Structures are given as structure tokens and as C-alpha cells.
Amino acid sequence: MVTFTIVSLYCCVSICIAYASARFHRSSNDYLNATGSLPTWVASISFLACNCGALEVLGLSGIAFRYGVQAFNFYWIGAIPALIFLSLVMIPAYVQSGARSMPEYFGQRFGPNVRLLNAVAILIASTLYTGISLYGLAEVTHITMDWPFLLAILVFGSIVLAYVLIGGFRATVYNEVLQFLFMFAGLLPLLYFSHKAHYGGLIHTGQYWHMWRETPIVSSTSQLDLVGVLVGLGGVISFSYWCTDYGLVQRALTARDLESARKVPLIAGFGKLLFAIVVVVPVILMSGHIQAQPGTALDETSPALIATLYGRRLLGVGIAALIAGLLNSLAANISAFSSLWTGEIYRPFLSSRRTESHYRNVGRAASVCCVAIGIVVALWTRSFENLSAFVLLIFSLFVIPFFAVLLTGMISRQTAAASAITGAGAGILAGAGIQLAFAERWLPSGSRLSANFYSAIVSFAAAALVCNAAHLLSLLRRSQIQPVNIEAMRPSPPKASVTVWCLAGTLLVVCVVVNVLWW
């Protein structure tokens, strides 16, 4: 009853924020993107919340239970270097191009066909993420409040859809700030209670307790190896996600100027370092107690901890915090789908001369469709062992190939639209092929997580090689290819300020220190 009351009050506040945000809608961009209109602190918390929602808590607490402190890799080596690169290199490129989104940026560099292909890929990924978020909501409410799975999906899907339809992207951002702060406050007591309870002691040996010391360089039998973690996660997956994810880039670009936009990922990076402790350490401390319950699924680790450690007074707050974080993830994906369909497919390719109110209505219709498709995906998600495994599968197929194309296009003037399309296609096929090979046991792997890391490496390599094939052949033949239009990639981005460099340097030093402490 306490949980239901808190969640109900919270949803009412979210609807009020949506109505307040609706007053700022003067154009379709205000409703769909809110580019260049928000304070730095709002954009930074929203950026962090878009990544550190309860969906991540469910997935990475399960990884922490299975792999121990190796889960820190997703927060540290799998985030901080890429966030610094995003701030210093990618954000200036996006802002200078004048693009309001990733697909638009692709369109400026490679033309409309690549823009459309990228938009469709992100649209598919956003739909799948929506289903995962709905699944997470249903799983938490089923475990803690005994709600039927489908009822939870319909109820929470309707609530989030309501405030997205009313307030658009601006309402989503401000609700993300509220949701993240509420979620963090609700999960923070886990650190204290887990330290106080400390069932079963700590596992001090092997990969479970050491991030690097016990990890082999390459292994088909070990759960993780250095090549998979450093190249697959720290290189390919990390940079692909942070530098090209539609929702994250969209939130960074809501800052009012380039200097503020550069600060957004760096400020969020410090929050990422802190959030890792809140998610991973309680699971490590309570690992012995969780193991005493063999029926507990990986994605139930965090709700199980809350149910075990929180008393009657705090249990409702803890569960409401998880639900708030999942609502945050769901809203982010619905608003991304709406913005993508309207701004990147419908408006430029299907109907370019309609009124601003027409495009806002199209965005609202897209949101409804996204929730409907997401319900089907949520039912399908139940067949996966762990949410993070499903998310990494989506990454290998729909995100990583386009990062390879983007990186190639920034480095080489010779990369044309046809090469970009074939490269992205090759990366998608290669990623799907390697996933199939691991699933059918044609290739050995110590864990599903390690298989995902190597799948990412193969997908990126295939996309990059095919994308550069024409240029490599021209070098072999000693012929010259005419440069394509590269106006979107201006050669001299403005230099970062002292403040930005200080933030980046401090963030990197702290990242190195925590890795040494958990060596």
C-alpha cells in the first residue's frame, strides 16, 4: 500500500511537470528535441539519468551477482574514456554542423540515404529498449506487489505515455531529473544496510573480486578476458554507445551553447563513478545471502536485496525508487522514438511542407505506436537470461556498425555514401552471424557476456573494413578518388576551455585511481 501511494503521488507530479513544460512549445523542435534551450545542470542530470536508470540497475546488479566487481568495468573503463572523447571531439563536431540529431549529422556527411538508414536502425533499437523498460517495470511490480505481468505493462505504459504526449521532450528531461534524484535517494540506503548485514562475507579471490589481476589476456573458458573487456567493452561498445546514442547526444545538445554542451558528459561522468558504488557494492557484500536463494533470477537481484534489507518503513520507498527509474527509461525511449520518426523519417522523406502543429501531432501518434509495439517486445524479453545480454545484442546489431561508419567518415575524406551503406550492412550481418555462432556453440566462449564483447569487435571491424574497401583498393591501384562533401566535418573545432580540460583531467585521474584500488 505504501509503494502504491508513493508511486501514485509521483505519477501525479510527473503529469504536472508535463503540463508546465507544454507552455514552452512554440515549434515542433521544442516538442521533439528542445535543442539549445536548457540549463547545463538540467542537461547533465538528464544525460546521466538517461543512462543510469533502474533498467541499468536491474541489468548490472545481475551482472555484479554473476561476475562480481567485473561489473565496475561497465561504469569505469566502459564509460569514462568515451565520455571525455565525446566532450572534446564529438560534441564540437555535432554543434558546429548545426545538426539537431545523429541521423541529421549522418545526412550532412553522407547524404539522405545514410541518414534514413541510420534513423531506421535507431528507431528499431528504441522500440526494443521500450519493450525492455516495460518488461523491467512488470518484473519489479510482479516481484514486490504481486501485480500480473500484463497489467503492470498496461498501467505504467499509459502513465508514461500521458506525460510524453502532453509535455514532449522537455517534460521528459525535467521528469528525468526528478526520477533520477528520487531513485538515487531510494537506492542509497542499500550501501548502509548491506554493509551492516554483510551476510556470507566477501569473495576475495579470482575474477569475482579483482578487475584485472586474475583476468587472462585471451581465453575461451574464462568468464571474461582482457581483450574482450578492453577492446570489446572499453573500445567498441563504450565509444559506440556514448558517442552515437541518439538519446544521449540529444540531451547534450539541449545545453544552451558549445561550452555548456561540452561540460554535460563530463559532469555526468562524475555521477557515473558514484552510481557504480551504489549498484555494485551492495550486491558484492550480500552475495552469500543471494546465493542462499537458488531460484533468484539475475534481473531480480536488486529487488530481492531491497526486499531483504529494507524494513517495512523503507521498503515502499526502495521499490518506488526502482519504479521511478524504470519510468525514466521508458519515457526516454518513447520520446526518442517520437522524435526519430517525426524529425528524421516523416518530415524529411514523407511530408516536408506541413505545419508545426501537424508535426507535433505526428510525434504524439508515434509515441502511441511505440508503446503498442513495446508491449509485444516486453513479452518477448522474458525469454532472455539477463537484460544486459539483450541490450548488448541490440548494440551489436544496430549501434556499433554506424559508429564504425561515423569514425571512418571523420577520418577519411574518401568515404562515400555507397561505402557507408555497405559498411553498415556488413557490420549488422557480421554481428548477427557471430551472435548465432556463439548461441549455437559453433564458437567457444566462457560466458554470454564475453561472447557479446567479441561480437562487438567483429561487427565494428567488418563495418570499418568494408567502409574503407574502396579507398584501400584505390591506394593499391595508385588512383585518386574524388573527395565527397565533408562540410559537416569542419577541420578546426574551437579549443576547449580551461574548465573543460580540468574536468576531463580530474575525471580521468579518478577513473585510474578506482581501477587501481580494485586491481
Image: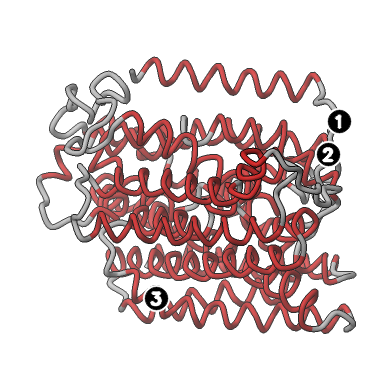
Give percent across and percent down for residue 282. Answer: 31, 36
Q: Amino acid at mark 2?
A: Leu
Toward which corner of the image does residue 195 lie, by quadrant? top left
Task: Determine the secondary structure under disc 1.
Answer: loop
Mark 2 highlights which residue? 258
Q: Residue at x 24, y 59 (%)?
A: 439
User: CB atoms at circles 1 and 2 under 8 Å apart?
Assistant: yes
Mark 1 vs 2, N-terminal side: 2
Q: Regarding mark 3 in the picture, which secondary structure is present there?
A: helix
Left or right of 421 in this view: 7? left
Res 514 → quadrant = top left
Tag nearer the camera, 3 or 1: 1
| Residue 236 marker | none
Residue 25 image point, x, y percent: 85, 69
Specify whether 495 is left or right of 102.
right
Residue, disc 3:
152
Q: Which residue is mark 1?
A: 494
Look at label 1 and name its amino acid: Pro
Q: Nearer the viewer, mark 3 or mark 2?
A: 2
